[in-house]
Image: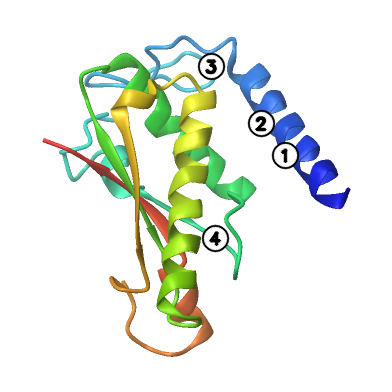
Amino acid sequence: MSSRIARSLTLAALTAALAACSSVPLDQGTGTGGTGADGASTGQIMDPFNPQSPLAQQRSVYFEFDSYTIPDQYRSVVEMHSNYLRSNTQQRVRIEGHADARGGSEYNLALGQRRSEAVSRMMGLLGVNAGQIEAISFGKERPRALGNTEADYAENRRADIVYQQ
């Protein structure tokens, strides 16, 4: 029963997030300059292949230990990429799920897959065509940080948004 309640709360939170975004133009943040919440130009380049673009600089969603729930502070990252993908329907992305070094290989592959699918699912709820997204897992096989501290583990618990050329 608690799993059903958790799912209902997650769905309610995503619905609220989508409702909050419904007044935002679908082309916001695309092209050579975006607009802020007040409609003024932000002057940001929205190109996932330009290193100066937020789309290139903010590609990772980090997760808590043993979790595949997208933390609130990373929802804006998923929303930014979703806005771009909705306006650039020819563009494809691969969501690569990762886990830290703790746990077995099979478990971490499954956890990484759930993380990549969570990001993919949120993008779908935000209007991105499912055909634009591939969700895969590398488990613990491609760590970003090689140490054994909690900070290293936290750096490896992520899903990366990788644009395909």
- The label number, if any, that marks residue 93 in the structure image: none
In the rendered image, which quarter is residue 54 located in?
top left
Left of 43 or right of it: where is 52?
left
Is label 2 in a helix, a strand or a loop?
Answer: helix
Per the image, the residue denoted by label 2 is 14
Q: CA distance from mark 4 to mark 1?
A: 15 Å
The residue positioned farthest toward the right in the image shown: 1
Mark 2 Cα-neighbour bin, 10 Å: few <14, some 14–19, many ≥20: some
Q: Amino acid at mark 1?
A: Thr
Residue found 27% across the figure and 29% down from its top: 46
Q: Give the side of residue 56 with respect to residue 77, left or right.
A: left
Q: Are marks 1 and 2 in contact (CB under 8 Å)?
A: yes
Query: Closest to the observer: 83 or 70?
Result: 70
First in residue order: circle 3 vs circle 1: 1
At a point 47% along the width and 44% down the height, the residue shown is 117
Give residue 9's position: percent from left, percent from top. 79, 38
Q: Position of residue 160 (x, y in %)?
A: 35, 52
Query: Which tag, 4 or 2, sits closer to the chain's start?
Result: 2
Q: Nearer the viewer, residue 33 or 141?
A: 141
Q: Which residue is mark 3?
A: 38
Q: Residue at x 50, y 81 (%)?
A: 103
Which residue position holds label 4?
63
User: Vertically, is 131 above or below 69?
Assistant: above
